Image: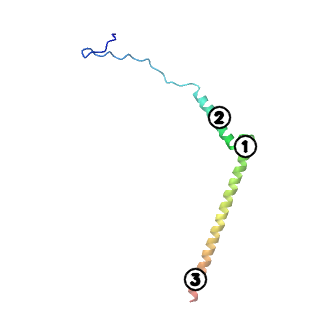
């Protein structure tokens, strides 16, 4: 092959085939990703203060408190709705008495 540029009279030389390259991957990549994920999870738990041995008990107490709050909210809504319905029934009964009394 010559090092002169191709002229209009000579065709360009064909490109040399490149050696095939396999996929670039590391066989330990899943282990690396799992290790990084584990580290980030531990860091997030430490930020929340849940990285010690009492974390399971703390989470159980938190879940119990949230469940109690939900029960309280549901019970309160149920009571208020009952009062509203009783008030509407009393107003309807008074309206019927006033209309019937005339």
What colouring does the structure picture have? rainbow
Answer left or right for 44 relative to 1. Answer: right
Q: Which mark is residue 96?
A: 3
Q: Answer above or below: position of 75 versus 99.
A: above
User: Residue 49 in the image: x percent, y percent?
Assistant: 70, 43
Q: Which mark is residue 32?
A: none
Front disc: 2 or 3: 2
Answer left or right for 57 relative to 3. Answer: right
The secondary structure type at the circle numbered 3 is helix
- The numbered mark, 1 or 3, whose residue comes first in the sequence reads 1
User: Residue 71 in the image: x percent, y percent?
Assistant: 68, 59
Quarter holding the C terminus is bottom right
Quarter holding the N terminus is top left
Find disc 2 in the rendering and name its residue. 39
Which residue is nearer to you in this view: 91 or 46?
46
Q: Answer above or below: position of 94 versus 47.
A: below
- Residue occupying image coordinates x 30% and y 16%: 12
Find disc 1 in the rendering and name its residue. 55
Answer left or right for 84 relative to 14. Answer: right
- Residue occupying image coordinates x 71% and y 40%: 51
Marks 1 and 3 sit apart, C-alpha to C-alpha, by 61 Å
Do labels 1 and 3 touch, CB within 8 Å? no
- The numbered mark, 2 or 3, whose residue comes first in the sequence reads 2
User: Residue 17 in the image: x percent, y percent?
Assistant: 39, 17
Toward the bottom, the furthest residue is 102
């Amino acid at each position: 092959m010559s090092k002169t540029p191709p002229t209009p009279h000579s065709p360009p030389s064909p490109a040399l085939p490149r050696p095939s390259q396999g996929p670039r991957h590391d066989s330990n990549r899943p282990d690396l990703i799992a290790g990084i994920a584990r580290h980030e999870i531990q860091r997030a738990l430490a930020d929340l203060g849940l990285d010690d041995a009492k974390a399971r008990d703390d989470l159980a107490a938190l879940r119990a408190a949230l469940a109690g709050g939900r029960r309280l909210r549901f019970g309160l809504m149920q009571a208020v709705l009952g009062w509203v319905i009783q008030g509407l029934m009393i107003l309807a009964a008074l309206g019927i008495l006033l209309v019937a009394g005339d």
